Image (spheres, rainbow, N blue to C red):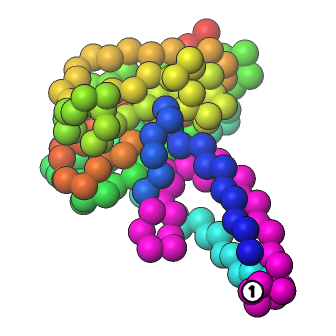
Amino acid sequence: MRGQGVVRSPHGRSIKKTKTVFKLPNANFLAVFESNYRRNHRGFDITIRHIPTICHKTIDLTSDGVTSGYITTPNFPRRHPKNTQCEWWIKAPSGKRIQLTFRRIRIKSSPGCSKAYVVVDKSGTAQYQPATSIILCGKVRGADFASTSDTLNVVFDGGKRASKGMKGYYRVIN
């Protein structure tokens, strides 16, 4: 049996693997499996589940007249649990864009933001590629970003240690 998985993780980050469970901050991945019954048992079993959390959200600003709001990590401004991962997809009306201002980011600082990070994908594709996204860590105030389309994606990985996390203010702009 040969298994191959192509996983797109934010900004070229490595995937967190615990035993046979992959934990991804987003679900944008492709998995290809091949089975050979002569060498192994027939077939394979795969289960993919979406486990809703308080910080994995699609924020739709195209109806209800709402044009702004906040995204925060769990418990902000107190510490979030260890290994917290969050993702927000913020969608503006067609022809509009999203502006995101981080009021405060307080997470572990490390070279290349390797231990904990926030990534903002301005393209709205949720690919989190270095050319279209920004990675932040440490203590940050007032960082300001605007999407290049009607969607903005944000992913947060708090790492192995609890920190105070982050709070960002988003709003629709022309």
Residue stretch rendered in magenta on the structure: 17-42
The x and y percentages for residue 73 are 32, 47
Q: Is residue 30 left or right of residue 26?
A: right
According to the image, label 1 marks what residue? Answer: 40
- Which kind of residue does numbered mark 1 sit on? Asn
Q: Give the residue displayed 37% in from the left and 21% down from the top.
A: 101
Neighbours of disc 1 within 10 Å: few (<14), some (14-19), many (20+): few
Q: Is residue 45 left or right of residue 87?
A: right
- Give the camera-side residue of 133 and 19: 19
Q: Give the residue displayed 25% in from the left and 29% down from the top.
A: 111
The x and y percentages for residue 39 are 77, 84
Determine if residue 58 is in view. no
Q: Give the residue displayed 19% in from the left and 53% down from the top.
A: 162
Q: Give the residue displayed 47% in from the left and 52% down from the top.
A: 15
Q: Is 93 above or below relative to 39?
A: above
Query: Quarter-wise, where is residue 115 in the image?
Result: top left
The x and y percentages for residue 23 are 48, 61
Furthest-bottom residue in this view: 41
- Give the camera-side residue of 113 and 71: 113
The x and y percentages for residue 148 are 62, 15
Q: Is 94 above or below relative to 35?
A: above
